[in-house]
Amino acid sequence: MIDLFQYLDCRAYLKDHYQERSARDAYFSHRWICTRLGQGKGSRSYFSNILAGRVRISPNLATRLVKLLELDKDQAEYFRLLVLFNQSDTAEERELYFDQIVRSANPGKALLDPDTYAYFRKWYNIVIREALDILSFKGETAEYVALAKTLVPNITPAQAREAVEFLEKAGLIGKDEQGRYKSLRKSITTGTQAESVIINQFQMACMDLAKDSLMRHPETDQLFSTLTMSISEGAYKRIEKRLQKLRSELAFLVEKDEAPSDRVYQFNFQLFPVTGVEKK
């Protein structure tokens, strides 16, 4: 039986639930579902429109779907959160409901790796992990003040301490022979549906950092470049491949850099449409 708590898309769950249930119960058809949802005996397109996103799931409709799917109390709460999350109109709403989803997920079947969630949840976790490789930081109380001021924009000493404690607990940093904290080069991988949402949130935070840096730093310390262009779908695919290759080349360049690091930089890739995309 499919597990609702492994979904982040309410419509994907509805589709899979329908396929599983209709294979088991012959009466469980689109027409039967539409009747149960109050659309009349002759209707059969209403449920299809729900699955396709052409019908917005209102609180009342969510309640009817919960009853139709025979969800228990915890499942019903989770399904309603999915609806709110999927239909959020702003990034702030989406983040709010995602936090609630993570807290309400079945603890026996984790929605995502907790370390991954916590690592990308705050941008300065990543920056501090990289910065420790170029700093002589042993975790003394006074050092947290200096560490907090090292980051741009600055964070508080309490936030710096919280980040270091988390990174050590997660096995991402450790002390060397001299007692200094350094990165352990343990990978944090992403890819699941839940983790991709976290990455989106982290990327939005990085865009905010870029806007802040544009106003804060002199031009000699940074490079900003923009290009607006009209392209074909084929050209887009070629650009996408080139960007992926460039990302790999940059990672390789940094990995093979024999000179000691003396700074931490953020490099963002953004390629997005600013007009409607016409499919031919």
Image: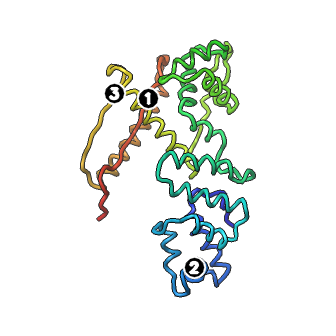
Helix, strand or loop at label 1? It is: helix
Per the model, the C-alpha gap separating discs 3 and 1 is 18 Å
Q: Quadrant of the N terminus?
A: bottom right
Per the model, the C-alpha gap separating discs 2 and 3 is 58 Å
Name the residue that disc number 1 marks: 253
Q: Decide if residue 191 is on the left or right side of residue 68.
A: left
- Of badges 2 and 3, nearer the viewer stands 2
Q: Which mark is residue 38?
A: 2
State the image coordinates of residue 101 (x, y, percent, origin top left).
63, 51
Q: Residue placed at 57% from the left, 62% from the top?
A: 10
Give the amino acid type for the residue marked by disc 3 in the picture: Leu
Residue 250 position by quadrant: top left
Q: Earlier in the sequence, mark 2 or mark 1?
A: 2
Graded by Cα atoms within 10 Å as few (under 14), some (14 to 19) or many (20 or more), the crowding at tag 2 reads few
State the image coordinates of residue 35 (x, y, percent, origin top left).
58, 82
Helix, strand or loop at label 2? It is: loop
Q: Decide if residue 75 is on the left or right side of residue 44.
A: right
User: Number of callouts in the render?
Assistant: 3
Helix, strand or loop at label 3? It is: loop
Q: Are marks 3 and 1 in contact (CB under 8 Å)?
A: no
Q: Which mark is residue 223?
A: 3
